[in-house]
Image (spheres, grey):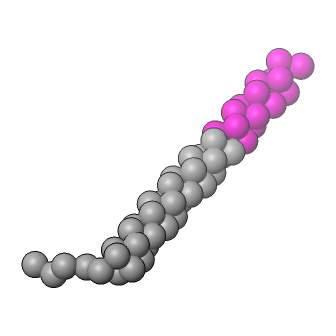
Amino acid sequence: MEVLSNNEYASWLADIKAKIQKARLKVILAANKELILFYYDLGQDISSKLKKAN
């Protein structure tokens, strides 16, 4: 097992934190994309129902 110096450990920890932040951002962007698509589809459904009702 390799022992890391304080600087190596700090660098390794910073890399892990950056990877976690990047993954979180990807999740947020994916969720926002899905919500936008959902609301667009919902708007299309509402518009279609209103056109048929008139």
Tell me where residue 17 appears, x and y as whole percent. 45, 63
Relative side of 43 to 29, left or right: right
Indicate whether 13 appears above or below 42: below
Relative side of 49 to 25, left or right: right
Question: Is any part of residue 19 visible from this angle?
Answer: no
Locate the C terminus by quadrant.
Answer: top right
Indicate whether 37 appears above or below 51: below
Question: Is any part of residue 15 visible from this angle?
Answer: yes
Tell me where residue 26 appears, x and y as whole percent. 53, 59
Please report the residue visible at 40 percent of the width from the left and 72 percent of the height from the top: 10
Residue 22 is covered by the magenta coloring: no
Locate the N terminus by quadrant.
Answer: bottom left
Please report the residue visible at 35 percent of the width from the left and 80 percent of the height from the top: 8
Q: Nearer the viewer, residue 14 or 10?
A: 10
Q: Residue furthest left?
A: 1
Please report the residue visible at 76 percent of the width from the left and 27 percent of the height from the top: 46
Q: Nearer the viewer, residue 51 or 34?
A: 34
Indicate whether 8 appears above or below 48: below
Tell me where residue 20 appears, x and y as whole percent. 44, 60
Residue 49 is covered by the magenta coloring: yes
Please report the residue visible at 45 percent of the width from the left and 70 percent of the height from the top: 14
Q: Nearer the viewer, residue 6 or 29?
A: 6
Q: Which residues are magenta?
A: 37-54
